[in-house]
Image (tube, rainbow, N blue to C red):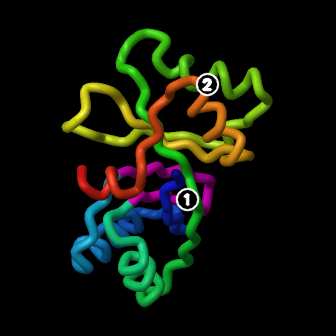
Amino acid sequence: MLVEQISIFIENKEGCLAEVTAILRDADINIRALSLADTTDFGVLRLIVNNHDKAEKALRKEGFTVGRTKVTAVEVTDEPGGLNKVLDPLWMQNVNVEYMYAFANSQCKNAIMVFRFDDHKKALEILGKNQIRVISAEEISSL
């Protein structure tokens, strides 16, 4: 169960992030999760939204470069060591986490983390064997 994420390359200057979110607002796009990583000149804004096609079209229309990537959303127990219950079996099987970020979710007592793995297929197998709940794109859309 993979979830689609869009990545937007934005200049690292005042107002760029607000411009992107205004474009999404005006297109009636709801942001479900986000991560922003920056360098001196540019940033990569990673988003999970309720309508990827519509978001991509609206952003491209305004001149933004948009990419799409498959990621995995995982429920992580909200307790000390909860994240290690996910990470430990993955690293023991040589699956690398390329990046991860949290997902705001008021409907669940546990956290939801979004992961980009170097091998999603292997990661999903390991998560399943360890009874770690993977969240579907449909579930995310309904939150």
Residue for point 61% across, 28% down: 129
Position of 24 relative to 86 (above/below): below
The residue singled out by tag 1 in the image is 43
Q: Secondary structure at mark 1?
A: strand
Residue 10 can be seen in this image:
no
Position of 75 relative to 49 (above/below): above
**C-alpha gap between disc 2 and disc 1:** 26 Å
**Mark toward the start of the polypeptide (2 vs 1):** 1
In the image as oriented, which residue stretches furthest toward the front?
129
Residue 87 numbered mark, or none: 2
- Dividing the picture into quarters, in which one does residue 49 lie? bottom left
Residue for point 56% across, 77% down: 65
Q: Amino acid at mark 2?
A: Leu
Residue extent of the magenta highlight: 33-48
Q: Decide which of 89, 32 is in the foreground and name it.
A: 89
Position of 109 relative to 16 (above/below): above
Q: Position of residue 119 (x, y in %)?
A: 73, 46
Residue 141 numbered mark, or none: none
Give the overall secondary structure of the magenta segment.
Answer: strand
Q: Position of residue 19 (x, y in %)?
A: 34, 72
Q: Amino acid at mark 1?
A: Gly
Camera-side mark, 2 or 1: 2
